[in-house]
Image: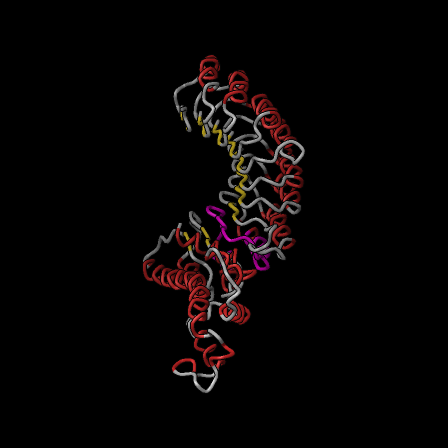
Amino acid sequence: MGLYALELCQLGLSDKKCAWLGSVLETQPYLQLLSLRDNHIGHTGIRRLISPLARGCRKLSVLDLSGNMLQSQGVRILAQFLVTSGQGLETLDVSSNGVTAIGARDLANVLVPEFNLSLKHLNLSMNQLEGSGCEAMGRMLVQNQTLEVLTLSQNNMFDNGCQALFFGLESNTTLKSLDISGNFISHVGARSIQTYLQSSSTHTPTDNQPGLQSLNVSANSLGDEGIDVLCGGLSTNRHLIDLIANNVDVTDNGMQHVCKVLKAGAVNTPSLLTLSLRHNYRLTRNSYAQLAEASKANHNILRIAADLQFEGWDEVWTKVEMILIRNTVYAMERYRVPLLMVARGRILLRDITHSTSANSTGIYSLPIELRRMILIALDKHSVLTRTQHISALNIACNPANHFSTKQELLAAVLANDYAFVHEMIKTVHS
């Protein structure tokens, strides 16, 4: 037997020590996670580790090298590893390593179907990619079919890098989470985000090829104008469910646009589930009062994070909390009601052709339409659409419909809304 996980963090490991570590790794065929974060490993050290990793750690899926000194030379070595031996690697963290645009290009060049089909999580935060490095990432996203989480925070992206990144993202169908916080992005860069959200508005979380589901734009100089632009994209959005916009210098004017988006979140329309607006210190009591009022019309929002630093904040926040509790109940009902309708429908709608005969007694003496109405009444909060009611009833009255799991049954009833409801339940339980 061998190790499944090895964490050697903050130990001052240098390039010289990597030769010894390589001899250890070569004897660990079951190793799945290797974390060497916050050491002093440079490109010489990673070169000494790559060959042993390739020979001995064939099951490695998580590699954390954050907080070292790889620079672009070390990332080039890692890129070669991804092509030749790292086909099982799913998570790579090289944040805070002094990587420049050159290293970003080397990495981007191999994250295409021709060379790599395994990497799902990539963290390049706190490096020096700048605009040209982010442009390389954008070109990679056009072709990449596996990456799901990309973290590019604090990379001096600026507006030109943001524009290039989202231009490439328009052609991508697999990325679910993107972090571009702390990148000096203004309302100009926000327009590229708006364009992306509008161009992908036909996608929903139910598509086999959904759009981005989580976006972090915190610590950027968006201001009211940038928030207005961003909300213009959110108004038609049907796939982004998590927006983090902390410390974006928004004021009461910008909050009006946010509230307008929240009011548009109807009960059966996929929209934001979580919204974070923390550390926006120019917002006043009036903004949060508007937020509480706007939340009343929204049946989807499940979490709101904000800093309420004013007298009487508890009264305003209590209103918001009540709305979030209501929406949590609605979310659970969208999961529970289809199952309940089908389960009880199997009994109430059993043998329809015979149950309406003159010999029928009890509930079966009632007209079939009345029995259907009884089942529909189980949806007390009207969280399902008429089409979904009909689907549940049709499934219930047909003995040939069998499902091996609850998820299969829910997917059959909810149809295009299933993935969105699934995300709602995940948010409730997280």
- Horizontal and vertical percent for residue 240? 54, 53
| Front residue of this view, candidates 32 and 148 | 32
Q: Is residue 251 magenta?
A: yes
Q: In the image, which residues are magenta?
A: 227-256
| Front residue of this view, candidates 199 and 333 | 333
| Front residue of this view, candidates 273 and 227 | 273
Residue 21: name its quadrant: top left
Q: Is residue 234 magenta?
A: yes
Residue visible at 50% across and 67% down in the picture: 399
- In the displayed structure, would residue 367 be above or below residue 147? below
Quadrant where the N terminus lies?
Answer: top left
Residue visible at 54% across and 47% down in the picture: 222
- Horizontal and vertical percent for residue 218? 49, 44
Q: Is residue 253 visible from the viewing direction of this image? A: no
Residue 377: name its quadrant: bottom left
- Horizontal and vertical percent for residue 353? 52, 78
In the displayed structure image, the side of residue 146 where residue 393 appears, left or right: left
Residue 4: name its quadrant: top left
The furthest residue to the bottom: 358
Q: Is residue 219 visible from the viewing direction of this image? A: yes
In the displayed structure image, the side of residue 429 where residue 372 appears, left or right: right
| Front residue of this view, candidates 205 and 107 | 205
- Horizontal and vertical percent for residue 424? 46, 56
